[in-house]
Amino acid sequence: MEMKKLRLLRLLFELIFSFSALADAATHGNPANELVQMINFNRSSHRLSNLTTSPGLGCMALQYAESCKGNCSNNTVHCRWNEDDFTEVFAPNCGVELPTFGTLSGHILSCRSKYLKPSLAFDQVVVNDKKAISLVSNKSLIDVGVGIVGDHKGPFFWCVLFSTDKVNSTFVLEGHGEGIKQRKGCFSGSSSHSSSCTSNAHRNHKLSQKYVMAVICIYILQHWIT
């Protein structure tokens, strides 16, 4: 009987550890970083150089996407592009050192009524028309930044910023920060993201994992006690 209890207890701890690892992996994923990886994979398949992830560009992409909230209808963004906003508002909000502000060489901005995982976002948002495909395939591009933000029930916004600056010290964040005034969404080059960067489906999946773990634990404990 004691051996049976020990085996069940060991199994219980192994299950808890496994589910915790899965939960951590789901929590710490950054879809903006994943989208950059897909952009680079696409460029590599066309024998183009990979783009460098710029946290400064990513944070400003997120700021721009967030400023466009409330301007999405029929999966189309109605939002004005004003480069002055980047130097006067978005860059300071992110903590981008203004002397390092480089050239913004192109952008992609889109919205959807619901969250899309990175693979779908790449197909439906990043390369959804000839103009976007041409931009992503531009040989002169050097840096890229992605920002994603949305409300719990949608819509969600994706913004991709590109730069052709060949200097390594462009769009530098103060103290290598995470975007000093950015508290919502997520951006590439950052290791963290908030709940407004993912969907209810992701959170429900995590809850389902916890429910399954709880049921298994109860089952094991019942057999352990008896």
Image: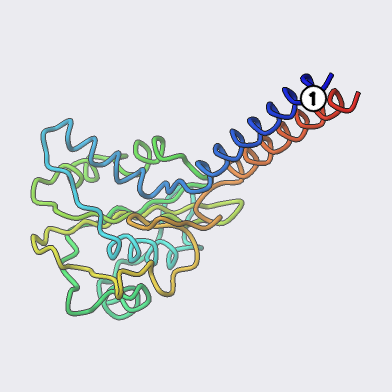
Q: Nearer the viewer, residue 214 or 205?
A: 214
Question: Which x, y percent locates residue 154?
Answer: 56, 51
Q: Nearer the viewer, residue 194 or 103?
A: 194
Q: Quadrant of residue 179?
A: bottom left
- Other-residue count near label 1 (Cα within 10 Å), few / some / many at <14 / 14–19 / ≥20: some
Dot 1 falls on a residue whose secondary structure is: helix
Q: Quadrant of the C terminus?
A: top right
Q: Quadrant of the N terminus?
A: top right
Residue at far right of view: 226
Residue at 17% across, 79% down: 99
109, above or below 84, in the image = above
Residue at 30% across, 75% down: 174
Residue highlighted by disc 1: 5
Q: Quadrant of residue 147?
A: bottom left
Question: Which x, y percent locates residue 4?
Answer: 78, 19
Left or right of 116: which side holds 142? Answer: left
Question: Which x, y percent locates residue 199?
Answer: 56, 46
Question: Which x, y percent locates residue 152?
Answer: 60, 53
Residue at 20% across, 45% down: 136
Residue at 21% across, 56% down: 162
Q: Quadrant of residue 46?
A: top left
45, above or below 143, in the image = above
Q: Amino acid at mark 1?
A: Lys
